Every structure is written in structure tokens, then in C-alpha cells.
Amino acid sequence: MNHIQEFAMSREQTVCNQSDSSTDSSRRSANAAVLSFEGRIVFGSRAASFADKIARTFPGACRMVLDLSRVEMIDGTGLGELVVAWMWAQAHGCSVKLAAPSRRIRQILELTHLTSVFEVHPTVEEALRAFSAEAVPQ
């Protein structure tokens, strides 16, 4: 079991017992999994749900695009989840790209220097095209 899966499993009870009005979705393209998030990725159930969704997707997808277009807010916990996902991907020869952050989310990523860690693309389609130009991970 990898770190992000352990982390998500340790918080599974919290996620199952708290309701949230926002929704998340995922889809697969020809070359990557696209995970779309909505609302706030903050301390508590939303950050745990975010980590759980990523953990469930990684075993079957070595390339992942995180669609942030509908994310209103992300705090330190949410940013930490992004970093854990990036670390796991790097350790396993996989890749994560961020797509379509709002101006506010983009500013947070820049302020925390995460734009030097992640490739950030203006749209999901551009992130998918960037994967198309790369060699397929083994």
C-alpha cells in the first residue's frame, strides 16, 4: 500500500460520516485520467475526499489531470494533498498535471511555489495534449 492510499484509508471514516453539497467527478481520456473537483479543498472532509479520490485513481492510471476549474478555495491541507499525490506519482514513474485553476487558485499555487512543482495548464484539453507529447510511463 502506498502513502496516499494509507493516508486516504486512515481518513475514510471521516469522509463517510460527513456530508458535503459539492460534487466531484472523473473520466478517462485516451492517455490520462481526468479528475474534476468542485468547491473547497480544505481541512476536514473535503481534503480527505480529495486524497481518497486520487488514491483510488492512481492504481489504474499513471497519468492524471486534476481539473481545478470549479475549485473555489484550497488551504494548506489541500495543498499538502496535492504534494503527496505528486510525490507518489514521482516515486512510481507517474505524472500529475493541474488544469484550469481559477485566478485565485493560480495565485495560491504561485505564492506557495507549487507552479515550479506541477505543470499547470489553462485547460484540461491542453494538459491532455501535453501528456500526448510525452512518452508513456512503464
Image: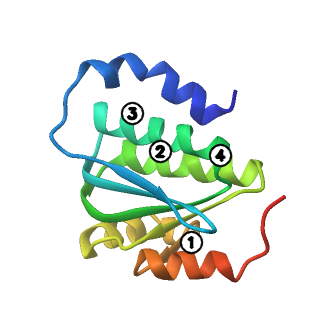
Q: Which residue is mark 2?
A: 81
Residue 1, quarter of picture: top right
Under circle 4, the secondary element is helix
Q: Which residue is mark 3?
A: 48
Q: 16 left or right of 56? A: left
What's the amino acid at mark 2?
Glu
Under circle 3, the secondary element is helix
Can residue 97 be seen here? The reply is yes
Residue shown at 49%/29% (left/top)?
Answer: 8
| Residue 55 higher or lower than 137, as above or below | above
Q: Nearer the viewer, mark 4 or mark 3?
A: 4
Residue 127 place in picture, x, y as percent: 52, 76
Under circle 2, the secondary element is helix
Q: Which residue is mark 1?
A: 116
The mark nearer the N terminus, 2 or 3, is: 3
Distance (Cα) linking label 1 and label 4: 26 Å
Q: Which residue is mark 4?
A: 60
Residue 85 place in picture, x, y as percent: 57, 48
Residue shown at 60%/53% (left/top)?
Answer: 86
Q: Nearer the viewer, mark 2 or mark 4?
A: 4
Q: Quadrant of the C terminus?
A: bottom right
Q: Nearer the viewer, mark 1 or mark 4?
A: 4
